[in-house]
Amino acid sequence: MAPRVRAGFKAARTGSRMVRGLLRSSAPGLPRLAQPDPWLRPRGPAWHLERGRNLSRRAAGLFVLVLISLLGAGVVGLAVVLLGFGVLQGNDVAGWLLALTLLLGLLGALWATRRARQLIRTEPQVSGGAPIDLPQDEAQLLSTLRAHQRALPAPARAAFQTTVLATRDALRLTAEDTTLERDVFDARQAAREDLPELMRAYQSAPRDERTDRELLDQLRLIEGRMQRVVQVRGEAQGRILRAHGRYLQDKYDPDARRDEK
């Protein structure tokens, strides 16, 4: 009898782990393998495979959640009926148990609703909006790129993409600055106002060669400024890195520094 009991407990524990795994809230969006960089458009075989696994897991989790909810609703309903008869007969204990049962049923319904929302939560659309894990300015910049690049002619699209990427690099290099210097201000203004306003003005203007030429000229102005920011900040970061290297060499290998001298 003891081996059968142990086997039963083992099977129950395994089943419980499987159910918890299916109902566990997954991270929003696709797994890391499927979404390595929100600026990219992952569409390889690995992306489709992971997406299929994610959808299958969530579907199985919803199915298990529905079964558990139906079972719990049946148990709570039966308990409410039986305790209701006790209340009608004037039993105070039955009244307290009925209130406790209704409270547990409400908590169970809230838990099931929360789990269902987590399981059916839609994946963030990289093509339509900015992912949720980007800084605000970079997310707005990515949204501007996704919203306007398809409607542009080929030369303007290439210039627009180059300008956006230069602005993104400038934002990243100035992200740690606490003071609003000119480089920081220009990078943030380009992402927040200059590029979105430029694209809105271009879309509302008549489409002709003059409009396209004006768009390219303004994009080159923004790109040139962003590239200067990237160059200056990159050189500054390089100097900091070299200084840190000399510090480490003096700290951990002073003999090598003396040999160089």
Image (cartoon, rainbow, N blue to C red):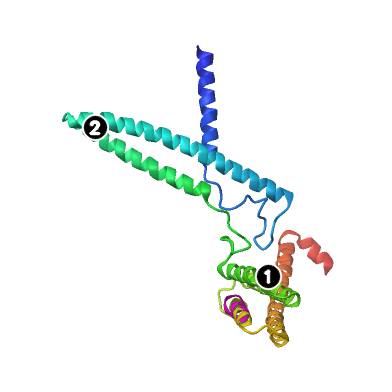
Q: Which residue is mark 1?
A: 150
Residue 234 found in image quarter: bottom right
Q: Main secondary structure of the magenta part?
A: helix
Left or right of residue 166, residue 175 in this image: left
Tell me if residue 131 comes above or below residue 194 in the rendering: above
What's drawn in magenta, residue-wise?
190-199
Secondary structure beneath label 1? helix
Residue 244 screen position, x and y as percent: 70, 66
Q: Which residue is mark 2?
A: 84
Q: Residue at x 52, y 48 (%)?
A: 120
> How far apart are labels 1 and 2 at the CA level?
64 Å
Residue 127 screen position, x and y as percent: 63, 62
Please tell me how crowded label 2 is: few (under 14), some (14-19), or many (20+) other residues with Cα within 10 Å: some
In magenta segment, residue 30? no
Residue 226 screen position, x and y as percent: 68, 78
In magenta segment, residue 193? yes
Residue 35 found in image quarter: bottom right
Q: Which mark is residue 164?
A: none
Tell me if residue 129 comes above or below residue 48 in the rendering: below
Secondary structure beneath label 2? helix
Residues at discs 1 and 2 in contact (Cβ within 8 Å):
no
Residue type, mark 1 in image: Arg
Q: Earlier in the sequence, mark 1 or mark 2?
A: 2
